[in-house]
Image (cartoon, grey):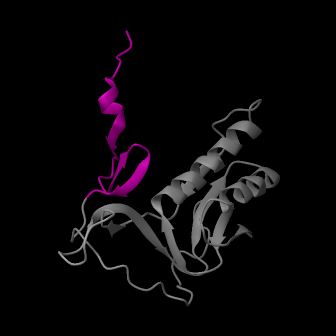
Amino acid sequence: MRRVCPPQSRIAMVSKCGFHIVKRDVLYPKRTKYKKYRKGKCSRGCKTDGIQLSYGRYGTQSCRAGRLSYRAIEAARRATIGHFHRAMSGQSRRNGKIWVRVLADLPITGKPTEVRMGRGKGNPTGWIARVSTGQILFEMDGVSLSNARQAATLAAHKPCSSTKFVEWS
């Protein structure tokens, strides 16, 4: 007999590692040291970590430094997975795999409209990830080169920063 979960338990699922929470298809940290952070500056130079493919054969690499919102990361992930499902409808769908290499871990605050100046910082409204130049955003494996390139093109339209397709060599 199959066990059916109530709908409210499907909304919030805690990952196995306990580092982040998946709630309504939004990835964010389970806990942070501080409730509110400063935005800070995005480093213009290249960092040495996260610039090479580690898990997959193909990837999407950022061309400039900036900030990615949690909505842009999720939209790009969904576009990539959707393309894999459409492209491999006749084949086994379990072949294609995607790794998300960025996590939106900085809270962004905002004040409501028509609120006067002062009285402190606003409440957290969303999450962002700082991305440096050359950082790998997504990795793909188990698909052909043409499918991976088309999926990366679809995913590149979602974030506000420019990206390029990279291949493991």
The answer to whether residue 26 is magenta is: yes
Residue in the picture at 65% in, 42% down: 82
Residue in the picture at 61% in, 79% down: 134
Residue in the picture at 74% in, 54% down: 148
Point out the residue furthest to the top here: 1
Residue range (magenta):
1-30
Asked whether the viewer can see residue 167, the reply is no
Residue 32: name its quadrant: bottom left
Residue 1: name its quadrant: top left
Q: Is 42 displayed left or right of 140 in the figure?
A: left
Asked whether the viewer can see residue 53, the reply is yes
Residue 27 x %, y %: 41, 54
Q: Measured along the vertical axis of the image, is residue 100 above or below residue 92?
A: below
Residue 169 x %, y %: 74, 70
Q: Is 131 displayed left or right of 149 in the figure?
A: left
Residue 73 x %, y %: 53, 58
Q: Measured along the vertical axis of the image, is residue 89 above or below residue 79?
A: above
